[in-house]
Image (tube, rainbow, N blue to C red):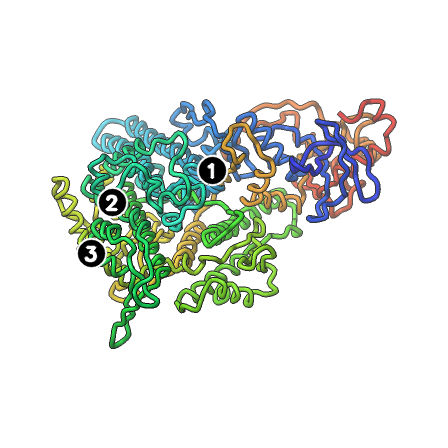
Amino acid sequence: MSGRVWYQHPSQCWALGSVAEAQGTTVLVRDADTAEMTELPLEDPKSGEASTHPCDPSHMENLPDIAMMNNLHPAPLLHLLRRRYLEDQIYTFTGEILISINPYMDIEGLYDIPDMEAGDVGEFFLSQRIPHVFTVAERAYKAMRTNPLRKNQSLIVSGESGAGKTEACKRIMQFLAFLSEGYSSRHDDRAAASGAGAASATATATAAAAAQATSNIEQRVLDCNPFLEAFGNAMTLRNNNSSRFGKFIKIEYSRGAIVGARMRHYLLEKARVVSPQSGERNYHIFYQLCRGADPATRAALGLDSAPERFRYLGSGGTTTIPGVDDAAEFEEVVAALTDVGIPAGTQASMWRTVAAITHLGDVDFVPGSVAESSAIADAAVVERVARLLGAADVASKLVTREVRARTETVTVRLTPAQAREARDALAKAAYDRLFSWLIRQANRCLESDHHSSAFIGILDIFGFEIFDVNSFEQLCINYANEKLQNLFNHHIFVMEQSQYASEGVDVTSIEFINNQPCVDLIERKPAGILPMLDDVCRQATRSMNDDKFKTRLDQAHKGTHRFYGSTRQHNEFVVAHFAGDVHYRVDGFIGKNNDSLTQDLRESMQSADDPFVRLLFCDDPAAAAAAAAAAAAAAAGATGATGGAGAGGAGAGAGAGDDDGGSGSPTSPVVTPLALPTTPNPASGSGTAGGGTAGGGASGKGGRPSGPQTIASKFKRQLAELNDTLLATAPHYVRCIKPNGKKLAHDFDLPRVLDQLLYSGVMETVRIRRQGFPFRESFGEFWRRCCAGPVGGYRSLVPAAASVPAPPEPRYTDREDPSTRATVTYDAAMTPDVVETCRRGTELLCSALLSAESFRMGKTKVFMKDGCLETVHRLYSATHATVIQKCGGMP
């Protein structure tokens, strides 16, 4: 036992040192590296936490699993992650949860898949307990194959922008495809070995087809990545290729083989389309089109190779990404669209839509000739937009709106400010619907008509966000994280309780931190923040504004401990999230949540001359079917192709904004490009996942929209559906960490990492463990500890224990666990008789030196409260101080 401690450090969060002196309410600590002396209060005045924490020998070991650490605390956890990261060991387990730290470099051999014998497929990484995303994927795959109660699995990958979520998901998909191919190969070999004949040949052909399908699905997912990243990713201050939407990919299985996949998306950041933040870009596709399209196409679209000329593209102040060639990436996008079956004619329609959105940003308004009205500032710009969309009346619809009463229709003029809101709403709606349409095309490429018996879902979703200025988007993102954290809290609480149960230890003192009150504050009717915002938006009166909305919030939640007013800005409110307090600025909340087109603009798009635009904006299935047929015919005419809209038309019953695609061919990546989505196959389990809808409203009687939905109401519905899906699966967690803000390799920013560990819920696992019995050691290991050192070690403090013999020297060897087939290392010296002797000595010593509440004897381990081992050590040091000093301390 060492005399070292972890102490609170001003720049490193926690550092290693030793107590030089303790007097009254302060302690003087000498730093282990610099020998610098630091005086600290015994307790942190803000948190009430002790300013020092004893250093256990296990804190200095390079442990692959934090759960193996005794006296678990944020300090040794943080420094273990740092040591491993600097040695290019970017993965570390904490129990069943994987922590992944972005290395910002390629690590040789990290993702090599070793050659495996057919019988070992699905057992290599898992049996070795190697911290790796492959291990998590393997565990999920094995559970899907062997757990009859919860066959469906989910891998929840989270972290802030730039933490490596997308890369982790790609690697998980890669390894799942490998396992599927191994399964098919094994069955192919068994079929061949079973003998000749028609049955054997059929089985072999089936296995070969399954292996080919797996390979095809993996390739199709890769084919979709370029255009999904182009339309869904952007350069932000934190990440040059940041995903600005969440996605849930269901990989569908028949037995052990992949047969298809399906994708859902969540909360595309539409505000970026019209107002990128300072220092950031709009979505990649805008710059790729400007720089990558050929001169003739650019001329036809009214674009040039200088995107900074356009307000929507240049308002962030930057239009380039170091080391990125937008023109070359545009070529990759075009190739990917072609690979998934979207013909050149349809692509041309897409580029017209993107160009129209680009030009919309340059449509501006001046006061009109009458009061409270507006006029187009530059007719040429809006005429270009009208031509690209095929909507001749768009100019008039931007400056007026019609109010329909029972017996009459009144035309209301819009002020310049209101006209700009209508313009931005049209741009965001067009882009959102285009993105949803692309998701449907990806699903058509990935789907199969094979029956699926189970799925493994991969959730790649935005992490918790706290910025200097937080708006409506951050509230939605943090609301999603609160919902996911609620699931995570339950999961880790159950895991910790199961460890005690397996050892026969009764623990009732551990409190479950329930963040449901925060979830209720945001979502619960009638006084939740989002329901109140929806009520304000539905009133749609000119007198209502963001400040009045904040006043209503203050009145409704005055005195609640999760909500309070900001002391730094009058237009901010504060929510006490699980990850910390967040100040939200209400400016723009109403406009961002409304985000709805006027009925006039929607109808203008639904009756546009361009059939592709009509398809994007149609919410009525019958009308959308007609638009799909017209768009397909137009695309075929443009490319010389033949064929109609394909199956899944009028009877689909799904709005144009749904993510689900129709049933495509399992053997060909070519899809019918403009067919409507069909009802999902119930066997795939896809009906419960939330979709990124872009429709103008919920489908009402006869398929007619019942009224515009707000962003908040749609997102709440999506999260509820996602929550239901995840609850029905066995979860596996990957927490991605961004080590620094400079995107540098081997640079570990301790305070930044600690914040992310807090936001991701990893620190909650530490808290739960410390609240129970954080020190846990097998009887053999603990009794060896007690027998080491001068004068017989700790056992010398208790006469009855002093007579219990020390265990023999360890003899480590490997063997296979028959229940899991995993290779485990065990101490052959620990025979049943030796273990019983160690148990007896442990119980004698603990009963004599510790209170009954501070320790528990399990079946194979001793469990102790925080600080108990230090109590024993202090007693030993005080009793044998002279001898210990002569011998140089404890070994």
Q: Which quadrant would the C terminus be assigned to in this image? A: top right
Q: CA distance from mark 3 to mark 1?
A: 43 Å
- Mark 3 nearby-residue class (10 Å; few <14, some 14–19, many ≥20): some
- Mark 2 nearby-residue class (10 Å; few <14, some 14–19, many ≥20): some
Q: Give whichever of 668, 349 is nearer the camera.
A: 349
Q: Earlier in the sequence, mark 3 or mark 2?
A: 2
Does the residue at mark 3 contact the one at mark 2 (Cβ under 8 Å)? no
Q: Which quadrant would the N terminus be assigned to in this image? A: top right
Give the amino acid at mark 1. Answer: Gly
Residue of label 2: 350
Give the amino acid at mark 2. Answer: Met
Circle 3 SS class? loop
Residue 538 appears left or right of 56:
left
Residue of label 3: 392
Give the amino acid at mark 3. Answer: Ala
Residue 816 placement (x, y as % from top left): 52, 28
Q: Give whichever of 54, 563 is nearer the camera.
A: 563
Circle 1 SS class? loop
Q: Which mark is residue 473?
A: none
Figure quadrant of residue 797:
top right
Residue 294 appears left or right of 54:
left
Image vertical order of residue 769 relative to residue 32, above or below: below
Image vertical order of residue 715 relative to residue 877, above or below: below
- Mark 1 nearby-residue class (10 Å; few <14, some 14–19, many ≥20): many
Residue 229 placement (x, y as % from top left): 35, 39
Q: Which mark is residue 162?
A: 1
